[in-house]
Amino acid sequence: MMFLHIFWAFFIPNILGYGGGPPIIPLLQAEVVDHYGWMTLEQFGDVLALGNALPSPIATKLAGYIGYQIAGIPGAAVALIATIAPTAIAMVILFKFLQFFKSAPQVSAMTQIVRPIVAVLLGTLAFQFFAGAYESAGIWQTAAITAVSLVALEKLKIHPGIVVGSALLYGALFLN
């Protein structure tokens, strides 16, 4: 039964998460943290931060790690299959219609409508992570990490992976 729960926890967000990794993250967080309680929000945030620092799609990294934490290698395999299956199914079914729908105005309109929704979902997730960081690290540590990260990303144009890795290292050394 655990493998069925793992499958559905990763299949549903990937079926509903139109647009790739960013829309899937809040949906996956709702399943893993809120619905099944396999992780705390702080743990999910740590896994997400580490996953963002590594190359390759975020959804597969999250699925592999979380599935492994829940049920070992079989859990990771089930989570990865559930993550990849929606895209594979959609590609097989819809491939012959690609040329027909490619220039449809409805497809363009749907993409334009989804963007603000994804922004709100990611903003909500960021707020939840910020609130969790505030509770565990305090206002000054959280503000300092936020300010330094903002300057590093926007002014100094440092790669996001380096900023995330540096924040993880800081947290490991000074916030434990």
Image (tube, helix red, strand yellow):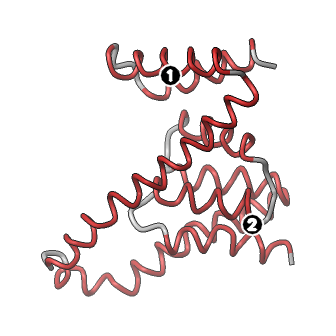
- Mark 1 or 2 closer to N-term? 2
In percent of width and height, residue 11 lies at 61, 73
| Count of numbered circles on the image | 2
Q: Amino acid at mark 1?
A: Val
Above or below, 69 against 173 in this view is below
Q: Quadrant of residue 42?
A: top right
Along the line of sight, the residue nearer the viewer: 64 or 128: 128
Q: Quadrant of residue 13?
A: bottom right
CA distance separating discs 1 and 2: 31 Å
Q: Residue at x 14, y 77 (%)?
A: 105
Q: Residue at x 72, y 64 (%)?
A: 77
In percent of width and height, residue 62 lies at 63, 51
User: Do residues under tags 1 and 2 come within 8 Å of each other at their CB atoms?
Assistant: no
Along the line of sight, the residue nearer the viewer: 57 or 148: 148
Quadrant of the frame with the N terminus: bottom right
In percent of width and height, residue 98 lies at 24, 80
Q: Residue at x 46, y 72 (%)?
A: 87
Quadrant of the frame with the C terminus: top right
Above or below, 56 against 134 in this view is below
Residue for badge 2:
35
Residue 55 located left or right of residue 42: left
In percent of width and height, residue 124 lies at 53, 50
Residue 48 located left or right of residue 5: left
Q: Residues within 10 Å of mark 2 (few under 14, many from 20)?
A: few
- Furthest-front residue in this view: 139
Q: Amino acid at mark 2?
A: His
Question: Is label 1 or label 2 in front?
Answer: 2
Label 2 SS = helix
Q: Residues within 10 Å of mark 1 (few under 14, many from 20)?
A: some
Q: Which mark is residue 163?
A: 1
Label 1 SS = helix
